[in-house]
Image (spheres, rainbow, N blue to C red):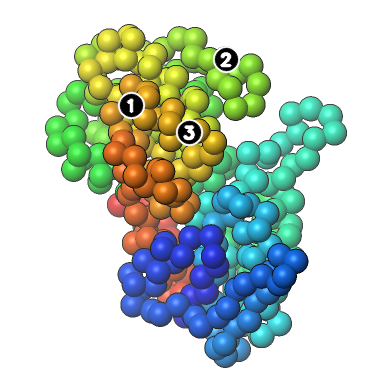
Amino acid sequence: MKILAGNSNPSLAKAISENLNTPLMKAQIKRFADSEVWVEIFENVRGEDVFVVQSTCHPSNDNIMELLICLDALKRASARRITAVLPYFGYARQDRKPGPRTPITAKLMANVITSAGANRVLTLDLHAGQIQGFFDIPLDNLLSTPVFVKDIKSQFGSLDNVMVVSPDVGGVQRARALAKRLDNAELAIVDKRRERAGVSEVMNIIGDVQGRDCILFDDIVDSAGTLCNAANAIMEKGAKSVSAYVTHGVLSGNAVEKIKNSKLTSISITDSVNLREDAMNEPKVRVVSIAPLIANAIKNITNEASISVLFEG
């Protein structure tokens, strides 16, 4: 087994390698003067099982090109099997044609990753489950739910007053899965109207949140408008407290400022995306590492063992 780290999230790659007690490969990924990506691998990979750790987060296009060029380098160096480890799978939000003359970028990403040389993909909490079918190679979609369940139990202690809330109708299945693991906690739903991309308006809360410790659960927090509006609406309905658990902390624009000024007690996110400095310095933002989860998945893939056992944690 060998692990190659891209530049998108070096701290996560290092944590994964430490969990596996396997050093990162010696390689150089830098830029030409005109910003083209330049890759050189300093270790023999012929016949090896290689894992490329690279989140396709901001700057998305640069990180995608790094990933593709690393995959090509490994393929031409005769690696036996190449696994693209994508803790955050970018361009996933366009997963269908909502209207004429629109792309399906999730399928485009699947095509280029496969063409570049990936033999399989390991990712975390895909934005939509059907994206798994866009790939013609094996894909393992890990779930952050077991990691969050363990953290929630340590943070809240008793779950008697906990209620899980989906920030929109589309996330109900995800929130229900978390609620089931939290001793069948009750579920509420935020009904909102989205006027345009990046702007949301909370309309109604489906469920009685009066006096409850509410946990908003989502896969991506980008502009943070949805989460913050939902938190404010939940508190207006008489909730005791409201916190959030989100897998991918994209946190673009003034998202951190919105979180700071919102009614959220805290927002817990994984390290699938390398957080900005202002997010790291915000007291309301907590990081829950998914390095052990990904490390165990890599170990099981190498040993040809089951991945599904990791969903049961």
Residue drawn where x is 68% and y is 39% of the image: 94
Residue drawn where x is 60% and y is 27% of the image: 198
Residue type at numbered disc 2: Arg
Q: How far apart are marks 3 and 1 (CA)?
A: 13 Å
Place residue 84 in its image quadrant: bottom right
Residue 267 visible in the current orientation = yes
Residue type at numbered disc 3: Ala
Residue 281: image x %, image y %? 34, 44
Residue 153: image x %, image y %? 21, 40
Name the residue beneath numbered marker 1.
264
- Mark 1: which secondary structure? loop
Compared to 30, does 284 lie above or below? Answer: above
Q: Distance between the residues labelled 3 and 2?
A: 19 Å
Tag shown at residue 228: none
Tag shown at residue 255: 3
Name the residue beneath numbered marker 2.
193
For marks 1 and 2, the one nearer the N-term is 2
Residue drawn where x is 25% and y is 46% of the image: 150
Residue at the far left in the pictured view = 158
Between 51 and 33, the one lying in front of the other is 33
Between 288 and 168, the one lying in front of the other is 288
Between 31 and 95, the one lying in front of the other is 31
For marks 3 and 1, the one nearer the N-term is 3
Residue type at numbered disc 1: Leu
For marks 3 and 2, the one nearer the N-term is 2
